[in-house]
Image (spheres, grey):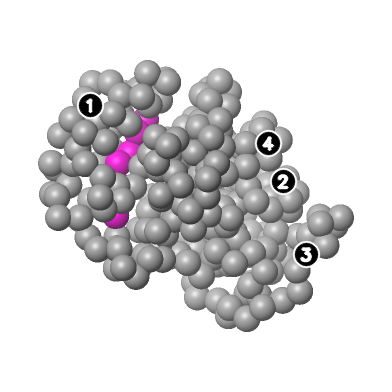
Amino acid sequence: MSPGQRPFPTNQTTQHADDPRVVRPLRVGGLLPLTTIDYPGELAAVVFCQGCGWRCRYCHNPSLLDPHAATSLTWGDVAAFLDRRVGLLDAVVFSGGEPTVQQGLEAAIAEVKARGFKVGLHTAGAVPGRLAQILPHLDWIALDIKGLPESYPTITGVTHAGRAAWESLALLLDAKIELEVRTTLMPGCTSEDVGKLARRLSRAGVKRYAIQACDTAHALDPGLEPSGIPFAQLVRDVDASSFTSLILRHP
């Protein structure tokens, strides 16, 4: 998901489930027509993809989780919008939700590329196989690493989510694509947790790392309370010299 951005609201009624034998057009949950922060150095639009298999407690766009929710936008609407923005925008970012859960993502990326835009992706690395398929067509990626692999079940509610995310990280580091790794600090984590994660990411080869404060006001879990630990204290064990770029995003 995009930091600090929320999609245009959509109608959340239910439609029929997809036939797995058919590659459906990309399901769109929202559109941000212009942003200067979601693709570094580029004027971009953000397409919020509908659906995610994880249930992260701090998710700030829960309306995008249901893959079968009907929305007021279609991929055709987005394509028509992009036709009008050729020469005005530099890039299109696919965010979510989790874009890689959709089979239609690859075709949508191809359409964006055909219009001359760069393509960015915000992903949690939930589907490494599909990420590998679309990787040759991507220009920039922001990968959400939520914690060490063993912490993922508590954060996402999915047993093997950590394995998928860290497999995706290895894939992207091997590919040497332009990459930003992001971590949102869920309440309950400690400075020791954050320092340990940062050290492991540095050893893995991460160069650009962003650490983000958690916005509990819009979280999926209504019982999630703000951390009582100041952000500066949580990141005190992170060695900035271990990264080419260390970004701290907090109020």
Mark 3 vs mark 1: which is more N-terminal? 3
The residue located at (39%, 41%) in the rendering is 151
Please name which of the two marks, 3 or 1, marks the residue nearer to the observer.
Answer: 3
Task: Tell whether label 2 touches label 4 (CB within 8 Å).
Answer: no
Q: Label 3 is placed on what type of residue?
A: Asp
- What amino acid does circle 1 point to? Ala
Work out whether mark 2 precedes mark 1 in sequence or the reverse, and give the earlier one. 2
- Observer-nearest of 163 and 59: 163
Dots 2, 1 in contact, CB < 8 A: no
Residue contact at pointers 3 and 1, CB within 8 angstroms:
no
Percent of width and height locating residue 235: 19, 37
Q: Quarter holding the C terminus?
A: bottom left
Q: Position of residue 31 (x, y in %)?
A: 54, 65
Quarter of the image for residue 88 reads bottom right
Tell me where residue 211 sits by quadrant: top left
**Helix, strand or loop under label 2:** helix
Label at residue 106: 2
Mark 4 crowdedness (10 Å alpha carbons): few <14, some 14-19, many ≥20: some
Amino acid found under the numbered disc labelled 4? Gly
Q: Which residue is mark 3?
A: 18
Discs 4/1, front: 4
Neighbor class of circle 3 (other Cα within 10 Å; few <14, some 14-19, many 20+) is: few
Examine the rendering and report whether any part of residue 90 can be seen. no
Q: CA distance from mark 4 to mark 1?
A: 32 Å
Label of residue 240 in the image: 1
Q: Earlier in the sequence, mark 3 or mark 2?
A: 3
Crowding at label 2, few (<14), some or many (≥20) Cα neighbours within 10 Å?
some
- Return the disc, 4 or 1, that comes first in the chain's sequence: 4
Residue hosting label 4:
129
Q: Which residues are magenta?
A: 208-214
Q: CA distance from mark 3 to mark 4?
A: 20 Å
